[in-house]
Image (cartoon, helix red, strand yellow):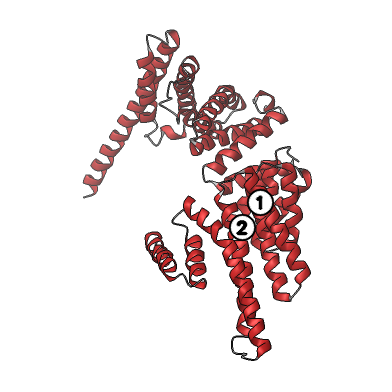
Amino acid sequence: MKKLFFILLGVMLTIASVQAQDSKTMYKKAKKLLSNYYFNPLENAKDLAEASDLINQVLLDTASQSDWKIWHAKGQIFNEVIGNEVKMKILNPNYAIKNVGSAIEAYESLKKAMALADKPKFKEECLKLMVETENHLNNVAAYEFQDKNYQSAFENFSRTVEAYELFKANNQEKDSRLFDPKVRSEQKLYTGYSAFYGEKKENAAKYFKELADENTDQPFVYEALYTIYNEMQNPTDALKYLNAGRSRFPDDTGLLYAEINYYIKEGKLDVLIDKLKKAIEIDPKNVSVYTTLGSVYDQLNTKAFETGDTVQMKSNFDNALKYFNSALELDPNNFDAIYSIGALYYNSAANYTKEINKFANDFSTAGTKKYNELKAKMLELFGIAKPYFEKAYGINEKDLGVLQALSEIFARQDKLEEAKFYRTKLEEAKAEQGK
């Protein structure tokens, strides 16, 4: 048994020796093929493809994985692979890069080579190649960003930022294309953009936070951080960046609308009015701002009714109607504006039902008179609301709010056939929408 063990061990050592020999042979061949390619790139393009396959095979060998020279060679080869494709893209903008990940492979190989290199001069050799790799990463990232391949763009952009840190750690940051702080900030911005639109929000937050700390002049950075932290259920940081952005860029519409949405969510109606009026100053052609401001006044109108403040109620009603009509002046067929005017009168009519109920069982002369007065006012308001809802129905026959309102109004007016028609339409729309 002992003899058999030594025989098996000898076989294993022989296999390992053969594998090492094969790896060394393949490595030398890959280097020779690369030299052939350098000598005549046009005629020897196939040599570059073969070299890339061979170097990957070499690195399947465990022993080869600890040799910096082999990783360095892979960096060289894949630099040429992606460099060749970038040249083709420059010559023909319609050319689609096939080996999109080659710049990343070149970068990761050189980074590995630097980690294994045991002498400063070897690290310098890697960094010389890294200058070229950094440019390739940036070019590929830019093309991918233009094509809206945001995740791929992020993977390439982020490594350009990492590459700068490698140059910096080795006191050679001047060799990096990101040595200029302006260029570096722009690179972080596009890296953050790519992560944000590529659904890598936490990665985006990292780059955008760095830019915010540098007092970036890009308002979207603050808007994005507000959005990201909102999605991460972190309202403290979300509001922190929203407030910082609004303070630095008071006229930026993106941040202003983010702030408006925040106050809508929080239900802070009084604060919203000033924000929305500011939005109208900045963006006077935006119909949705007028309808939103009208809706705020509509809600305040309901609150004033509940407290019995008739003066404030009239003021809020008039302001709501004013802003809804302003929206219609910009877009006469705007569904939201038409619906909102109908809803304004409808809600005002509905408010009267609460008062009417107080007198429903009061059969005294005074009680009956009051009941009839309130009912007449309610029906008048429903009557004013009806044509707006009918026009809204003409625009969208499936809207549940429109169908609900019309069925209710016709029922109040004792027009039961019409009420039944819209009630049936309402049930059909609910079933169709799964509600």
Structural distance between the alpha carbons of marks 1 and 2: 8 Å
Can the viewer see residue 210 in this picture? no
Mark 1 or 2 closer to N-term? 1
The label shown at residue 133 is none
In the image, 26 versus 132, the foreground residue is 132
Tell me which amino acid carries mark 1: Asn
In the image, 398 versus 289, the foreground residue is 398
User: Which quadrant of the figure has residue 235?
Assistant: bottom right
Name the residue: 38% across, 14% down.
45
Q: Position of residue 274 (x, y in %)?
A: 77, 54
Q: Position of residue 109 (x, y in %)?
A: 49, 31
Which of the image's four quarters has the C terminus?
bottom left
| Residue marked by disc 2 | 341
Residue 408 placement, left or right of 180: left
Name the residue: 61% across, 35% down.
190
| Residue marked by disc 1 | 325
Name the residue: 49% across, 28% down.
103
**Quick one: SS at disc 1?**
helix
Cβ–Cβ under 8 Å for marks 1 and 2: yes
In the rendered view, would you say 361 is above or below 166?
Answer: below
